[in-house]
Amino acid sequence: MTARYTAAYQALQGRLVEVEILLRSAARKERRSPINSRHEINALCRGAIVLLCAHLEAYVKELGELAIDSLHVNSVPRKKIASQFFFHISKNFIEELRETGDPEKSAEKIFLFLESDADLWSRDAPFPRPVPVDRFNRGFANPAFSKIQSYFGRFGYVVYGNQLAARMRAHYMPTRNMVDHLVDTRNKIAHGDPLATKTPSDVTTMIKIVKDFCRATDFIFSIWWRQHFCPIR
C-alpha cells in the first residue's frame, strides 16, 4: 500500500512541533499581557521563524536524499538520469578544475576525480554504490522559491514550478510569495534587524502555508519520481 506522504514530509511534521511550541507560548503571552510581554513575544516569534525556515530547508534536502538513495536501492538504470545530476555528484571536483590553470595541478585534480567518482560516471547499468548526497546537496541553502526550483532542476525535474502551480491553483502565487517572505524575514533576523518580527497570528499563517507548500511538493515530486524512476512513498 502506498503511503500518503514521503518519509521526508513525515519527518517535517515531527520537527514542526518545536515551532508550534514557541508559537503557543507567544500566543499565551499575547493574550495575557501583550504590552508587558512584547519583548518575549517578539523573541519567541523570531525564534519560530528561524526554525521554520530551517525545517523547510531540511525538508527539501531530505526529499532529495530520499530520491537519490532510491536510485541505488532500486537499481535504477543510469541511462534514465539527467546529465546535470552527474554534474552535481562531482560538482566540487569540476569547480576546482575550472579554477585551476596550471597543467600539473589540473592533472592531479583529474586523478583525484577519477579515483573518487569515475565509477559513478557511466550510462551503463545502475549506480554501483550509493551516491554521495552531501556533495549533491552542496550549495543549497536559504530555501527561497527560486532556489528550491533550481534544486529540483538538478534531478532533471524542470517542470516543478508548472506542476506546483497546477496543483495549488489560486494558492500558488500567495504560497510562493510567502515562502520568499519567510526566507527574507529569517535572513533579516540572522543579520540582527530588530524590526524583523511577526505576530503570533502571522507565524500561524506562515506555518500553515509552509505545510501546504511542502505537502503539494511532496505529492507532485513523488509522482514524477515514480513515473521516471521508482517509488519513494
Image (tube, helix red, strand yellow):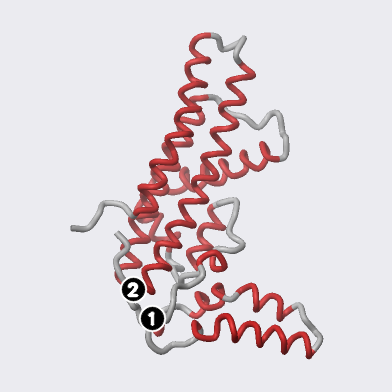
| Res. 171 in view | no
27 or 184, which lies in front? 27
Q: Are marks 2 and 1 in contact (CB under 8 Å)?
A: yes
Q: How far across and down, in percent of the image, does residue 138 sit?
A: 59, 63
Residue behind mark 1? 80
Quarter-of-image position of residue 192? top right
Q: How far across and down, in percent of the image, does residue 24 sit?
A: 46, 23
Structural crowding at the residue carrying mark 1, measured as other residues with C-alpha within 10 Å and reported as few (<14), some (14–19) or many (≥20): few
Structural crowding at the residue carrying mark 2, measured as other residues with C-alpha within 10 Å and reported as few (<14), some (14–19) or many (≥20): some
Q: Which of pointers 2 and 1 lies earlier in the amino acid sequence?
A: 1
Label 1 element class? helix
Q: Is residue 173 above or below residue 27?
A: below
The answer to whether 122 appears left or right of 143 in the picture is left
The residue sitting at 72% across, 80% down in the picture is 98
Q: Which quadrant, please, contains the N terminus?
A: bottom left
Q: Is residue 179 above or below residue 47?
A: below
Q: Which quadrant, please, contains the C terminus?
A: bottom left
Q: How far across and down, in percent of the image, does residue 223 sit?
A: 31, 63
C-alpha span from label 2 to label 1: 7 Å
The residue sitting at 36% across, 82% down in the picture is 77
Label 2 element class? loop
The residue sitting at 38% across, 73% down in the picture is 71
The answer to whether 89 appears left or right of 195 in the picture is left
| Res. 11 in view | yes
Q: How far across and down, in percent of the image, does residue 114 sit?
A: 60, 86
Q: Is residue 97 above or below residue 61?
A: below
The answer to whether 91 appears left or right of 155 in the picture is right
Amino acid type at image mark 1: Lys
The residue sitting at 51% across, 40% down in the picture is 52
The answer to whether 78 appears left or right of 107 in the picture is left
Amino acid type at image mark 2: Phe
Residue behind mark 2? 229
